[in-house]
Amino acid sequence: MSASTLLHTLFRYQAWANSDLLDKIESIDPVINQEERHTVIRLINHCHVVNRIFAAHLSGTKHGYTSDNTADTPLLPDLRSAVAASDRWYLQYLETVTPEQLGEAVPFAFTDGDSGCMSREEMLAHVVTHGGYHRGEAGRILSQISISPPWDTLAVHLHQTEPSRRLRTPMLENTLSAS
């Protein structure tokens, strides 16, 4: 599997996982669990802002952020829409970026002014792993308020979106019978 193919898979997974988590966040009672709901929305907003910052680095544009989160907490429907648009942007970006470009080093400035440099491929990997980390944090908060968090794993995503992966293949049959 090429890096490009893997990145496509990971960003499709991220879009699926983000949507699933945002569905769960909608089920948080805004009165009884006001603090937890606010914290989870702030976590997802932080991920969104970081994703937009790295999208700007990847596209060579200015992002306009001075921090890795916004001062105001967005309304959940607005955040859902923004996250979905960002997920679409990354999937579209992966349709146009070449393997050579993935290896290119891109210098940039962090929001605190410090300098950084990562390859495009490293930036993309950062966006996916960063999002997974914070979705896990959000899932833990959901558990603490007795809401089952999404089953957010790549394996679950692959098998839900490609049910044929559940079918046993001749190669797998041979491997299983040899054990």
Image (spheres, rainbow, N blue to C red):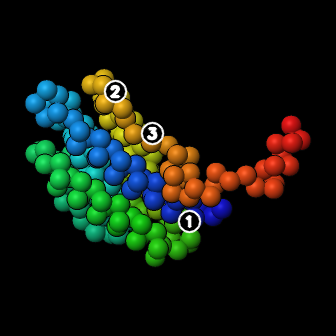
Q: Is residue 144 visible?
A: yes
Rendered location of residue 110, percent (x, y): 30, 51
Q: CA distance from mark 3 to mark 1?
A: 25 Å
Under mark 2, the amino acid is: Ser
* Residue 22 location (% of width, % of height): 28, 46
Tell me residue 53's x, y (percent). Answer: 29, 57
Sequence-wise first label, 1 or 2: 1
Q: Which of the two discs, 3 and 2, labels the residue nearer the N terminus?
A: 2
Q: Which residue is mark 3?
A: 151
**Which amino acid does the dot numbered 1 rest on?**
Ser
Instruction: Tell me which numbered mark, 3 or 1, is placed earlier along the sequence.
Output: 1
**Contact check, label 3 and label 1, Cβ < 8 Å:** no
Q: Which residue is mark 2?
A: 143
Seen from the viewer's position, the closer of residues 49 and 29 is 29
Figure check: 121 above or below 133: below
Q: Secondary structure under badge 1?
A: helix
Q: Point out the image quarter for the C terminus.
A: top right
